[in-house]
Image (spheres, helix red, strand yellow):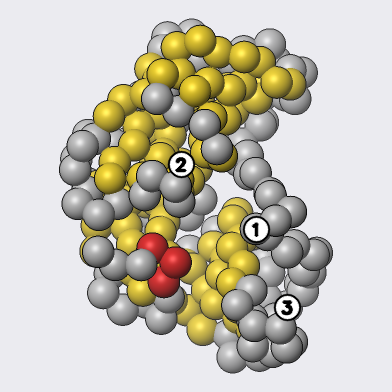
C-alpha cells in the first residue's frame, strides 16, 4: 500500500474525463478512474477508511472507491431534480453542494448510507460550487494571495510538514494556466506538477 499522504489527486473533464493521481513531484502519474464518469468534481479522501469520494456533476452521482486497489466502486447517492457539484467527507458523514435544492444548498448524509439527508444551509445561490471541510486539529490554514502566481485558482492544498517558512508547500490548480502547480510558502521554487491541454481542475 502506498502512503496516500505522498500523492496528489485531481479530476479531469475534457476529452477523456478521469480521476488521476501522481506523486507530489508529478511522477508516477496514473488514472485511477476512467470509465463511467463525465464531469468528476470535488474529490475528497476519507483517511480513516482509505477511500476516495467524488461527485459527477453531469450524472448527479456521488461515488467512492478504495484507494488501495481502485476497486469496490460504489454509488452512494444518485438523484433526479438535483444539481450535485462537489462532495467532502469528514468523520461519519459526507457533505455535498446541490445547486437545484432550495436555491443552492449544502446537504449531509451518512457516508455508508446517504439516503437520509439533512440540509445544513440553503439560499447559497445557483453558482455554489466547491465545498471544503477544515478541521482545526488537522489543518493550519492562513490566507495566501499573490496575483503574480495565482490567476484563476480553483483548488488549494497545503503541505505543512515543516515549521520553518520556505519549507512548506502549496499545491494548486489554476484554470488560467490549465495545470497543477507547486510553490513553497515563501513564493520560491514554483513548478508545474501536472500539465494538460484538455482538462478543468477542481
Q: Is residue 186 above or below residue 172?
A: below
First of labels 1, 2 by sequence position = 2
Q: CA distance from mark 1 to mark 3?
A: 29 Å
Residue under the point 46% across and 41% down: 41
Tell me which numbered mark, 2 or 3, is placed earlier along the sequence: 2
Distance Cα–Cα, label 1 vs label 2: 23 Å
Q: Is residue 110 above or below residue 2?
A: above
Kindly state the secondary structure of the residue where label 1 is placed.
loop
Q: Residues within 10 Å of mark 3 (few under 14, many from 20)?
A: few
Above or below — where is 68 with respect to 75? Answer: below
Kindly identify which residue carries mark 2.
Answer: 41
User: Which residue is denoted by mark 1 in the rendering?
Assistant: 138
Q: Which residue is mark 3?
A: 148
Which circle, 2 or 3, is nearer the viewer? 2
- Numbered disc 3: secondary structure: loop
- Residue at coordinates 41% horizontally, 71% vertically from top-left? 6
In front here: 76 or 40?
Answer: 76
Q: Is residue 192 left or right of residue 31?
A: right
Identify the image quadrant of residue 182. bottom right
Amino acid at each position: 500500500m502506498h502512503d496516500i499522504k505522498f500523492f496528489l489527486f485531481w479530476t479531469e473533464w475534457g476529452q477523456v474525463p478521469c480521476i488521476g493521481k501522481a506523486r507530489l513531484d508529478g511522477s508516477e502519474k496514473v488514472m485511477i478512474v476512467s470509465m463511467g464518469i463525465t464531469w468528476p468534481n470535488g474529490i475528497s479522501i476519507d483517511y480513516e477508511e482509505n477511500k476516495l469520494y467524488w461527485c459527477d456533476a453531469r450524472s448527479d452521482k456521488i461515488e467512492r472507491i478504495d484507494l488501495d486497489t481502485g476497486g469496490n466502486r460504489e454509488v452512494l447517492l444518485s438523484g433526479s431534480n438535483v444539481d450535485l457539484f462537489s462532495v467532502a467527507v469528514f468523520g461519519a458523514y459526507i457533505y455535498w453542494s446541490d445547486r437545484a435544492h432550495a436555491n443552492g444548498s449544502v446537504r449531509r448524509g451518512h457516508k455508508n448510507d446517504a439516503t437520509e439527508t439533512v440540509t445544513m444551509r440553503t439560499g447559497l445561490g445557483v453558482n455554489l460550487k466547491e465545498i471544503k471541510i477544515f478541521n482545526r486539529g488537522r489543518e493550519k490554514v492562513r490566507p495566501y494571495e499573490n496575483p503574480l502566481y495565482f490567476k484563476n485558482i480553483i483548488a488549494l492544498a497545503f503541505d505543512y510538514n515543516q515549521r520553518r517558512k520556505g519549507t512548506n508547500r502549496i499545491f494548486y490548480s489554476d484554470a488560467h494556466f490549465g495545470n497543477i502547480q507547486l510553490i513553497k510558502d515563501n513564493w520560491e521554487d514554483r513548478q508545474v506538477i501536472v500539465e494538460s491541454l484538455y482538462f478543468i481542475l477542481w
